[in-house]
Image (cartoon, helix red, strand yellow):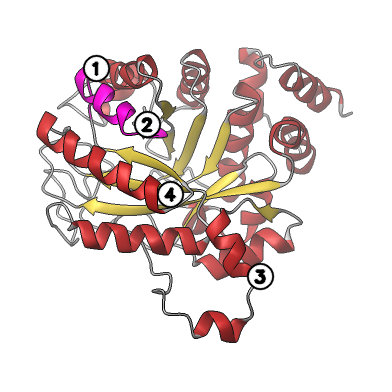
Amino acid sequence: MYQRYNELAERALAGEAPREAEAMWVLDGDDVELLPLLQAAFEPRRKHFGRTVMVHILNNVQSGLCPEDCGYCSQSRDSKAEIDKYPMKSDEEIFADGLAAAESGATRYCMVMSGRGPSVARTRKIAELVRELKRRHPMEICVSAGLVDDEQAAILAEAGLDRLNHNLNTSEPRYGEICSTHSYASRVATLAAAKRHGIGTCSGIIVGMGESSADLVQIAFDLRALEVPSIPVNFLIPIPGAPLGADGSLTPERCLRALCLMRFANPSAEIRVAGGREVNIRSMQPLALYPANSLFVEGYLTTGGDSVDDTYAMIEDAGFEVEGNPVWETLSTRSAPEIAGADAPQPTSA
């Protein structure tokens, strides 16, 4: 009865990808039982990450004002969404948000900038921020700034950037349906530039944009071929005024199956439950920790999300543990009155 699940788990434990037919079955099989599927996906997750959960906090360092036409994005040039729009935050704001992220237990602090891509001068500024944040806090730094070439990647690498994020979002054949101002190939080129200069890559998908199961399988295999070590799996949040609305495909089970597929196809990668987990997985969120080993807290750029406290309670209740960072570990050993009386700023939303 459980042979198919066992075969998926065994292949993933051996570092092998599922066959295409198996991958399609994970997403569409009428006879799939969710709990055995989640347990099968948990086996490679446990092998590579145990029961730890890496926490990421996003900081929308530069919002809106973007010339690109990505249909899913509330910050695109075609969006009518009522969002805050501002140029890059001040250094003081960015450092304060970095401190809050460290004290909240973030293993990785992710700075995101809207726009097609940074100029060389802006890249040097970002590098200065990265260097200073890494000096101040024992946590990893990720930057998402759009398209990046070799010159820019070299600057960021020299600053010690841990991860460069640039999501593929959907499969290559249908990329033109969600964006016309840049190509799938340009996104792959950005990841390649980062990799050439020794920066870890972070690239994932958005589920729920009208894609087929075959599209999801293709991009899961593409990310494997690109050897991406950090894969965020987003579930479309329909934002009023954004060009692209919900396609009606996202049930909690569909989301969990997509996470399982990503784990089977990329057994040793960090799989992250990213944007839209609260809206789309809802009460079944704890089950996402079986295929996934990381998540975001405190929101997703222009939309809110579950708080640190609520998320940590979910992680603990599900029998997992927060990976954290040395700053947070020190604070978490102190009593509540001590923390309440501390002079350091308290964690705020990114």
Q: Residue 169 — which label?
A: 2
Quickly name the residue at label 3. 333
Label 2 – label 3 distance at C-alpha: 40 Å
Label 2 – label 1 distance at C-alpha: 22 Å
Quickly name the residue at label 4. 275
Going from the N terminus, do you reach mark 4 or mark 3 first?
A: 4
Query: Which mark is nearer the camera, 2 or 3?
Result: 3
- Label 2 element class: loop
Q: Is residue 305 magenta?
A: no
Residue at 10 percent of width and 34 percent of height: 121
Residue 135 location (% of width, % of height): 38, 47
Quickly name the residue at label 1. 150
Residue 258 location (% of width, % of height): 57, 35
| Closer to us: 45 or 324 | 324
Label 4 – label 3 distance at C-alpha: 30 Å
- Label 4 element class: loop
The amino acid type found where label 4 is placed reads Gly
- Circles 2 and 4 in contact, beta carbons < 8 Å: no
Task: For label 4, count other residues whose C-alpha is less than 10 Å away and answer few (under 14), some (14-19) or many (20+).
Answer: many
Q: Is residue 159 magenta?
A: yes
The amino acid type found where label 3 is placed reads Thr
| Closer to us: 257 or 307 | 307
